[in-house]
Amino acid sequence: MAFIRDMFSSPDAPPPVDYGAIGQQQEAANVEAARVGARLARPDLVTPYSTTTFRESAPDQYLGTMTLTPEYERLRGGEAAVQQGLMGLSAQRLLDIPTSPFTTAGMTAEPSQFQYSSVGAQPEYSTEAATYQLPGYSDLNTYTTNAADEFFNRAMARLNPQFDRAERGLRTQLINSGIPEGSGAYNEEMRLFNQGRTDAQADLASQSVFQGQSLQSNMMANILTGRGQQLGEIATDYDVAQRRRTQGIVEGQQQVALDREARDRQIAESLRLRQQPMSELAALMTGTTPFTQVAAQGPPGVAPVTGPSPVDLGNIAAMQQQDALARFQGQQQQQATALGIPTTLLASRLGRSTS
């Protein structure tokens, strides 16, 4: 009878999950996991420099104590003395730091750009100063004529007295020879004498022209030579003046560059002297000792210890609920199959039961 009763009685649905209670349990599990992790992360540390121990000074609170070795305890005391001395020196250097604004007063003034007017104007080439001037065509003809006339006149001044004496001697000779003056023989002799005198004058005139031309050529040669020398001297003077001006420009530009470099060096030196106290102060402030370096590094690295992860109770409860619901549905399926209940009806009943 009990079997039949169980067959016709509906199985009990699994109770709903109490997520509030599970949340409280989860919170407690998380707290316990954190406490375990805190204890595991604080092992006692022993290094060549110190020993570090931890103790729980209050619930969930830990106090770490580091004890230096005697050697490093002495180093720490020495470092304190050094640091105190460095602080005293730093205070002294602090007084040396200038507080007034940087100025270039008293330094070499900023050089101005080179002024080309300081070396004079650009020299000009001119031949006006040459005293040997080339004569014109009419001047050459006049010079030649005057020279020929002067040569002819000087020569005639010497010949005329000679011809006069020769004429008187010829007349006397003819008369003494019995050839009367005015006779045909006399006139013929005088004609021949005058003809010789005229020919001599003509030859002298030709020589005078040649002599005038020679003097003209010599004069032109002297003028050209003298003018060439003067033009050479003018060109030399112009070249010297040009080189002197170019040299003045180069030297002036070099002097401007030197003045600018001198000013830059003065500014750089002044800035260096101004920054020197600050550099020394920075060096004193950053001074370290071996112990400071060791202390800054801390104890040797310890691999971090990860505490236990808390159990996800919510996920476990959900999985248990799904398993209980599956068993419940299986029981109802078996009961329906035994009683011949249609599957659709069973499904609707299962839906009402689970809801």
Image: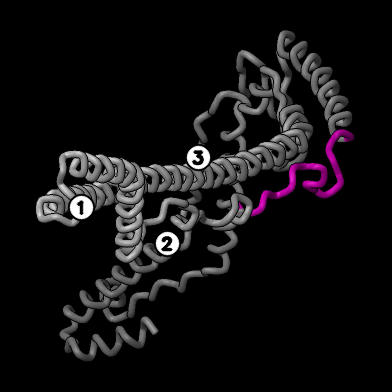
Which tag is nearer the camera, tag 1 or tag 2? 1
Q: Which mark is residue 306?
A: 3
Q: Looking at the rendered structure, which numbered label has been put on residue 315?
A: 2
- Mark yes or no: residue 337 visible: yes
- Residues rendered magenta in the picture: 95-114
Work out whether residue 306 or residue 139 is closer to the camera in this orientation and state it. 139
Quarter-wise, where is residue 163 in the image? top left
Is 258 covered by the magenta stretch? no
Residue 107, by quadrant, is top right
Mark 2: which amino acid?
Asn
Q: Which mark is residue 181?
A: 1
Which image quadrant: the N terminus?
A: bottom left
Give the amino acid type for the residue marked by disc 1 in the picture.
Glu
Which label sits in the foreground, 1 or 3?
Answer: 1
Residue extending farthest top:
71
Residue 24 x %, y %: 59, 61
| Amino acid type at mark 3 | Thr
